[in-house]
Amino acid sequence: MSTEMIRSKKLHKSYEGEVEVHALRGIDLSIKKGEMIAIMGPSGCGKTTLLNCLSGLDDISDGYVSIGGEDLNALSDNKKTEMRASRMGFVFQFYNLLPVLSAVENVELPLLLAGRTKDARKKAEKALDLVGLSDRYEHRPSALSGGERQRVTIARAIVNEPDIIWADEPTGDLDTESSDKIMDILCELNEKNGHTMILVTHEDRVAERAERIIHMESGVIKRDQNNGA
Ligand SMILES: Nc1ncnc2c1ncn2[C@@H]1O[C@H](COP(=O)(O)OP(=O)(O)OP(=O)(O)O)[C@@H](O)[C@H]1O
Ligand SMILES: [Mg+2]
């Protein structure tokens, strides 16, 4: 049985508009189950676009993407949404926490939305425990530090026990100590629970923690290296 989790072939993505932007120019990628990958490259090279296209958040312009052997192009929008809800977790900046909900309510939300109400609160608490926030269940996002908020976001991403976690600059605005803590959590989740992890970062310090580093430039993969440190 193949252990391939994510596959793209000749993936292209263009944004239409006054000026057409050809953001991805033929991405061929194979990602195995349980891999931890860092994607690096200059601003505007297509990193976020790549995550959006691989996760089915955005339609592709040409080529092929599959998740667990399923061709995303063959799935309806509803099926793709369902797949994301059941198999993927997102640590994206625009997936912000809801300010009116407490930490535990924010984490519980994906379970409630997926109709998995049984023990939802308990699972949410367990996810918060995993990221070291056992004493912050009832805090609203505004009463948490940046690093703590990011840990709530991670708890929310893992509460569904997803196969794949996508993280776009998960340590973006954090100081070194908080950033290291976030990476400790993500690495442990990857090692212990076997989540496939794809994270975008511009920091060498963060990328070093991944087993494979993909360098992008102007919509193509320039380098794909095993990080055999
Ligand atoms: N919705 C959109 N409409 C039009 N162009 C877009 C859209 N989203 C991104 N682009 C363009 O596509 C290119 C790739 O953008 P993308 O957001 O993937 O870059 P990135 O590598 O994530 O950059 P950063 O490190 O700054 O986040 C950029 O030139 C950007 O201007
Ligand atoms: Mg980006």
Image: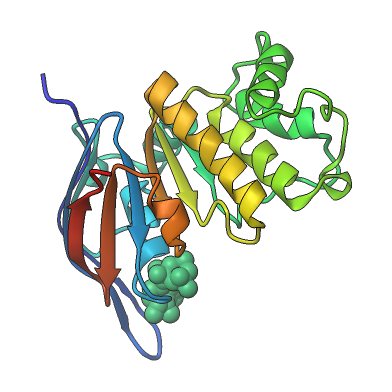
- x and y percent of residue 97 in the render? 72, 46
Task: Kindly give the residue lying farthest to the bottom in the view shown.
Answer: 18
* Camera sees residue 11: no
Q: Residue at x 52, y 57 (%)?
A: 169
Q: Nearer the viewer, residue 91 or 115?
A: 91
Drawn side of residue 24 relative to residue 94, left or right: left
Could you tell me which quadrant the C terminus lies in? Answer: top left
Image vertical order of residue 8 relative to residue 101, above or below:
below
Residue 19 relative to residue 3: left or right: right
Quadrant assignment for ligand 1: bottom left
User: Vertically, is 117 above or below 89?
Assistant: above
Number of numbered discs visible in the structure rendering: 0
Q: Give the quarter of the image for residue 132.
A: top right
Residue 58 on image: x %, y %: 39, 56
Residue in the foreground of this view, choosing between 60 and 32: 32
* Colour mapping used in the image: rainbow
Nearest the viewer among 163 and 131 is 131
Compared with 119, 215 (above or below) is below
In the rendered view of the protein, which quadrant contains the N terminus? top left
Is residue 167 in sight in this rendering? yes
Name the residue rendered at 29%, 35% in the picture. Answer: 35
Image coords of residue 96 (percent x, y)? 67, 51
Image quadrant where residue 12 sits = bottom left
Extreme front residue here? Answer: 229
Q: Position of residue 162 (x, y in %)?
A: 45, 27
Residue 125 lies in quadrant? top right
Residue farthest top in this picture: 118
Vertical position of residue 34 compared to residue 26: above or below: above
Q: Residue at x 60, y 20 (%)?
A: 115
